[in-house]
């Protein structure tokens, strides 16, 4: 077996420590960072943070976008969701299956993860961890250095590539042993525990459930969930109101050809993206949402401009929407 391993790197302390423990035994380690649109509200910032954390730990990494593969898993996870819409077990199986392919491509002998027995209630129970290894076809070739002594020996241990006595037996949710190890290895740059995945966020999950319930779960629609306040106008139509300049910019980038954009004419305020049926009734509701979320609300009506084509802007007059109606439409 080659003295080379593939390590799944998330930017969190556990994954960095797992790689460092194995590197300390003279094993060449290549870190793989799986990226998808749900990894963070700002995927580019996520990539930069992980790159920085890995570089500070001396771990070379490659980034692999798995958005399309994960999206199919999200629609119907075999092992269900966590507390919100996080299909943690299915996600792990997907990542490890892809890691196995990379292992073969890179001529590596085994895969490393930073999983700790008992640290997470759904995906890090012993029976779940054993099942994940089996389902990803990595049984015997999946090393979890931080809890390795609590599992049976892997192939690299049996073959003497890895010295089992230098592996760890960490268990449970306490982070103290990991923090002590971080000090020993000089690791200071890493994500806080449980940070990152948007699918664990109850507000984001609620918006995603709305999409799924209407049968309109596409990657374009899911990407839009990261931005703005969302309102369901009818089963086919949503209005998304920007909360700040970043939302306004991103919504313009994500606008599709048939979407309609609305904003106050000649005054600062939120952009609103209308996706679905652009009937007069829905245009008027979206325009009222623009006014309601603007700083200056003209009860007699404010001038709104709307367009599907930037070169063909049209006028509309709208007043603010009643508060109870806003809450009724809010996703």
Image (cartoon, rainbow, N blue to C red):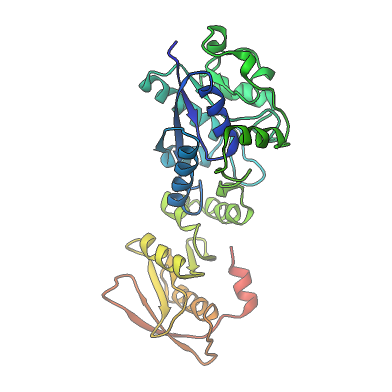
Task: Indicate the position of residue 294 as horizontal and vertical percent values.
Answer: 52, 80
Image position of 162 with respect to 314: above or below: above
Write the residue at 62% across / 40% down: 81
Pick out the residue farthest to the left.
311
Res. 218 visible in picture: no
* Number of on-image labels: 0
Q: Closest to the observer: 283 or 159?
A: 159
154, 252: nearer the viewer: 154
User: Which quadrant holds residue 109?
Assistant: top left
Position of the C terminus by quadrant: bottom right
Looking at the image, is 263 positioned above or below residue 30? Answer: below
Name above or below for residue 47 compared with residue 276.
above
Residue extending farthest to the bottom is 300
Residue 33 pos. (x, y %): 46, 36
Is residue 166 among the parts visible in the rendering? yes
Q: Quadrant of the N terminus?
A: top left
Residue 190 placement (x, y as % from top left): 56, 43
Work out which residue is located at the far top of the displayed protein and give it.
Answer: 159
Please report the residue visible at 49 percent of the width from the left and 89 percent of the height from the top. Answer: 301
Viewer-proximal residue among 325 and 241: 241
Q: Position of residue 189 (x, y in %)?
A: 55, 43
Residue positioned 52% across, 19% down in the render: 138
């Amino acid at each position: 077996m080659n003295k080379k391993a593939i390590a799944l790197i998330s930017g969190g302390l556990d994954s960095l420590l797992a790689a460092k423990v194995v590197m300390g035994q003279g094993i060449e380690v290549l870190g793989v960072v799986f990226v998808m649109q749900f990894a963070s509200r700002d995927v580019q910032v996520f990539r930069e943070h992980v790159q920085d954390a890995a570089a500070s730990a001396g771990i070379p990494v490659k980034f692999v976008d798995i958005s399309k593969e994960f999206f199919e898993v999200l629609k119907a996870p075999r092992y269900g969701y966590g507390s919100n819409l996080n299909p943690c077990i299915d996600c792990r199986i997907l990542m490890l299956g892809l890691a196995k392919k990379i292992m073969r491509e890179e001529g590596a002998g085994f895969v490393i993860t930073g999983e700790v027995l008992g640290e997470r209630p759904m995906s890090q129970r012993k029976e779940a961890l054993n099942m994940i290894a089996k389902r990803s076809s990595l049984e015997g070739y999946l090393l979890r250095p931080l809890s390795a002594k609590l599992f049976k020996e892997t192939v690299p241990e049996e073959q003497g590539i890895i010295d089992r006595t230098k592996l760890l037996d960490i268990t449970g949710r306490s982070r103290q042993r990991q923090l002590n190890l971080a000090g020993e290895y000089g690791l200071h740059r890493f994500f806080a525990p449980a940070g990152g995945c948007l699918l664990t966020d109850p507000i984001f999950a609620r918006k995603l459930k709305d999409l799924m319930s209407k049968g309109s779960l596409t990657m374009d629609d899911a990407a839009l969930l990261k931005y703005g306040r969302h309102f369901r106008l009818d089963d086919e139509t949503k209005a998304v109101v920007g909360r700040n300049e970043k939302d306004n910019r991103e919504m313009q980038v994500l606008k599709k050809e048939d979407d309609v954009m609305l904003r106050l004419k000649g005054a600062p305020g939120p952009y609103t993206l209308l996706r679905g049926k652009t009937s007069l009734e829905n245009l008027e509701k979206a325009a009222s949402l623009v006014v309601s979320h603007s700083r200056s609300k003209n009860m007699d009506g404010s001038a709104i401009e709307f367009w599907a084509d930037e070169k063909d802007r049209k006028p509309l007059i709208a007043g603010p929407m009643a508060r109870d109606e806003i809450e009724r439409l809010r996703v």
